[in-house]
Amino acid sequence: MSAGAELRVGPEFRQAPKSVLSTEPGSDHSCASRPPSLSDLFRVRLLGAAQSTLSCPECRSAPHRLWPALTVLLWSDRLCEVRALARGRSGDTPPDLLVRAASARAAALLGDIATGVAELEAVTGPGRLPVGGAVALGWLAEALTAAGEPERANRVLGRGLGATTAPFPRAVLLTARGSAASATGDLPRSLADHLASGRMLRQTTVTNPAAVAWRSRGALVAAALGRGDLAAALAEDELAAARQWGAAGAVGRALHARAVARHDDSAPESLDRAAELLRVAGLRGDLVAVLCDCAVMCAAGGDPGRGRRAVAAAEAAAAGDPVLADRVRSAARVVGGDPGGPALTRQELRIAQLARLGDSNRVIAETLFLTVRTVEFHLSNVYRKLGISGRRELAVTLPSASPH
């Protein structure tokens, strides 16, 4: 079977509803704080099936039984459990490679991006994975983008997209390509890739946002492009599906997207709830992103003290990871949490966010009732304070909180 082929799952996973979720809306808080819903019970049943598979020697040696079990653990935020499965497994048999790939994905999600990259590179050579290979290439590309190497990510994605025609792996790869495009400042292409990922998933039975978070990522990009209606629609759909699945990480990511899409008075509280859930899930990279967006949103809304507290929380979450620390420094420069430089003023931040959307100086001036010369002056201050050379770098340097 080719690396990108669709999986044939064992009987223990065949009872899943079409969307792998129930009709119970659930809650925005961790399962420990509320009675179990139908979605919780179903997720527990799936986890039981996965753990049963992983405890069965015969199943552990069958890639088509092993791979669904590993992905259920990943989708359920059982990341440390996945990491533990890989301890002492350094072999190159197909089952060993699958466990090592899932473990590397868990490492990246836990915020150990360098380890995730190194381990995924070790298992994604041509022809190494009998199943899941294209998905693992998508994971590698995402980890490379998170590590600040979107060009390398795009080379990996070229390999993956050329190796499979199966809808689910292609959806994973398109979402990863959308993230790489966003990291280089190409927001229109990023949005197009996330939407294409969603169209690809319509050919499958997968709607669980824990599997492919195309809607929440697309919502963040749409908000940055000023497409508020699209951002809100994507975020609301993502949140509904995430609540149905019920895992803390999926709900936290969806709350983040909805807060950025709405950008109203309730957004900081939504970001606080998102941060709480992402801490529970252990998704360190997502947690840092939420806290950075909260910092910028609070600064833009006239509450720089709360923004600085969010920066401090982000610094604590990013401790020990230089890539995450760089992102926090960008947010700190915006809100003044970095002792190495002054904060952007509210006017500078507003102008910078409009410039990030691609508005010309003249359009910004007309929008804010300023002169073009005043806009130019403020943008020069923004570039100096952020340590960048021009507006193209704003898409990478400013967090994703929308000005709308």
Image (cartoon, rainbow, N blue to C red):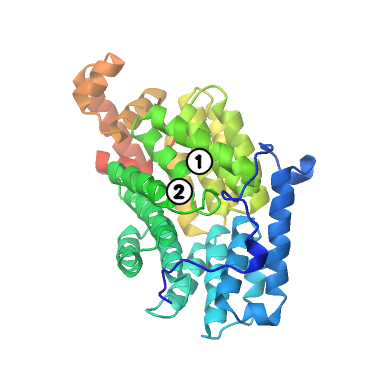
Question: How packed is label 1: few (under 14 Cα within 10 Å), some, or many (20 or more)?
Answer: many
Question: Label 2 is placed on what type of residue?
Answer: Arg
Q: Earlier in the sequence, mark 2 or mark 1?
A: 1
The answer to whether residue 122 shows anywhere in this view is yes
Q: Quadrant of residue 390?
A: top left
**Point 33% across, 31% down: residue:** 352
Q: CA distance from mark 2 to mark 1?
A: 8 Å
Residue 350 is situated, as x and y percent measured from the top left of the image, at: 37, 26
Is residue 203 shown above or below 72? Answer: above
Is residue 114 shown above or below 63? Answer: above
Quarter of the image where the C terminus is located: top left
Residue 345 is situated, as x and y percent measured from the top left of the image, at: 40, 26
- Numbered mark located on residue 327 in the image: 2
Who is closer to the viewer here, 38 or 266? 38
Q: Secondary structure at mark 2?
A: helix
Quarter of the image where the N terminus is located: bottom left
Would residue 155 appear left or right of 169 to someone viewing this image? left
Q: Secondary structure at mark 1?
A: helix
**Point 22% across, 27% down: residue:** 376
Who is closer to the viewer here, 395 or 25? 25
**Point 65% across, 39% down: residue:** 23
> Mark 1 sits on what residue?
292
- Numbered mark located on residue 148 in the image: none
Question: How packed is label 2: few (under 14 Cα within 10 Å), some, or many (20 or more)?
Answer: many
Q: Are marks 2 and 1 in contact (CB under 8 Å)?
A: yes
Who is closer to the viewer here, 385 or 104? 104
The answer to whether residue 387 shows anywhere in this view is no
**Point 37% across, 23% down: residue:** 347
Residue 398 is situated, as x and y percent measured from the top left of the image, at: 39, 40
